[in-house]
Amino acid sequence: MKVTLRTDVLTNNNKAADFNRELFESTKTLVVNIMSSPGAGKTTLLEETVRALAKKYRIAVIEGDLATERDADRIRAMGARAVQINTHGGCHLDARMIAATLGELDLDEIDLLFIENVGNLVCPSGYDLGQHHKVAVLSVPEGNDKIPKYPQMFMRTELVLLNKIDLLPYLDFSVEEARKDLSEINPESTLFPLSARTQEGLHEWFSWIEGAYVRCVRQ
Amino acid sequence: MKSMHEMALMGDILQLVHEDAAEKGLCKIEKVELIVGEIANAMPDALRMAFDIFREQNSHLFTKQAQLVIHLEVAEAECILCGEKYRPEQKIALCPNCNVPSGKVLTGETFQVLSYEGSLEK
Ligand SMILES: Nc1nc2c(ncn2[C@@H]2O[C@H](COP(=O)(O)OP(=O)(O)O)[C@@H](O)[C@H]2O)c(=O)[nH]1
Ligand SMILES: [Mg+2]
């Protein structure tokens, strides 16, 4: 007997994402899903973000980076709540993992929730977690070819944080070329060159968060 | 990392099939058909490998010869300026005619379980 389904493979994920989204909206929590290759600087950027914004906002971070508590500890040291998800070696976070974690967080008491996805430029891009915004971090040492090589990631992220610009003098990375490649894949996305190390350019990212928070609360 | 991803996807696919089959009282799945878009972020070969592994681990659910059929969906984009339709490769939004980022993806992102075949429980 043949049964026709025509069901999206990610149906169950998307149901969980909708569940998360409703929760985030009803509690007015701004949720940002941060993706990059391993070592691009997600945790360092989040440390700096918590340091700069913790006085004004109640911040929590969900850490999806593989099986250690190391990144969560770094965030806690900066004064934010951090919950570690163990993906058991899995290559991405899915919406059900996030839903299962939300019990540990009192969303009514949180203004900004950042999700540090598993370090990987391929797999996390297709999974809706229910977030308001998807942000990619690309670091200068990874090279200019990453944007055209991983279009599935960059076509789905509205903001790219180009990190480690303090290293530009030592490398042949071209910021202009990155902007051009990005616009050819996703004309609606924005790129902020910055350095979590020297703090250069971080204010643009912080203002972006503040703007996104205002829009999230007004809805 | 990559085949790990297809294992996770195949887990989702078989969960959908299994849920539906249980509802209809079907067992011994003989065939699963998928539609996989070119830019859907899933590699057909890795999906086939993942299917074989699941089939072996779940012999109560599948017949020994159970097969996975993948229908590929070609990617197509359309330029919002000149209407040119093209097959997007890496630079998804770049219209080859206007040479500006004006493309909209029409197809190629589909990733669906099209159908499955099983027999009624005895
Ligand atoms: N030079 C430089 N190094 C950085 C910068 N941001 C992060 N790093 C370093 O890059 C490495 C990986 O950073 P981490 O935040 O753990 O990356 P993650 O894997 O994406 O979370 C660490 O050694 C950081 O100190 C930066 O802006 N400039
Ligand atoms: Mg990290």
Image: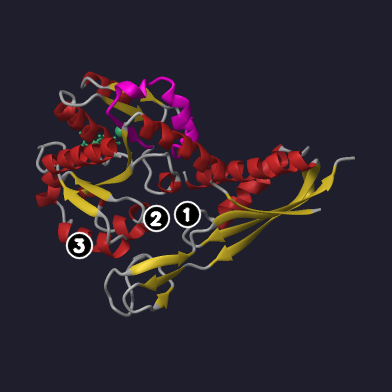
Question: What label sits on residue A152 in the rendered view?
Answer: 2
**On what subunit does the disc labeled 2 rest?**
A
Residue positioned most to the front:
A218
Q: Callout 1, which amino acid? A: Asn
Q: Is residue B80 above or below residue A215?
A: below
**Picture residue at 72% right of the left edge, 41% below the top:** B56
Q: Determine the CA span between mark 1 and mark 2.
A: 7 Å
State whether discs 3 and 1 lie on one chain: no
Q: Quadrant of the C terminus of chain A?
A: top left
Residue that badge 1 annotates: B41
Residue pointed to by mark 3: A177
Q: Nearer the viewer, residue A30 or B107?
A: A30
Of the residues under marks 2 and 3, which one precedes in the sequence? 2
Distance between the alpha carbons at the discs numbered 3 and 1: 25 Å
Q: Chain of mark 3?
A: A
Query: How many C-alpha atoms fall within 10 Å of the one at disc 1: few (<14), some, or many (≥20)?
Result: many
Whether residue A147 is visible: yes
B8 is within the stretch colored magenta: no
What kind of residue is marked 2?
A: Gln
Residue A122 versus residue A93 in the image, above or below: below
Q: Nearer the viewer, residue B24 or A80?
A: B24
Query: Hey, which residue is sitting farthest right in the picture?
Result: B122
Q: Magenta segment, which residues?
A: A88-117
Helix, strand or loop at label 1? It is loop
Q: Secondary structure at mark 2?
A: helix
| Quadrant housing residue A207 | top left
Q: Amino acid at mark 3?
A: Glu
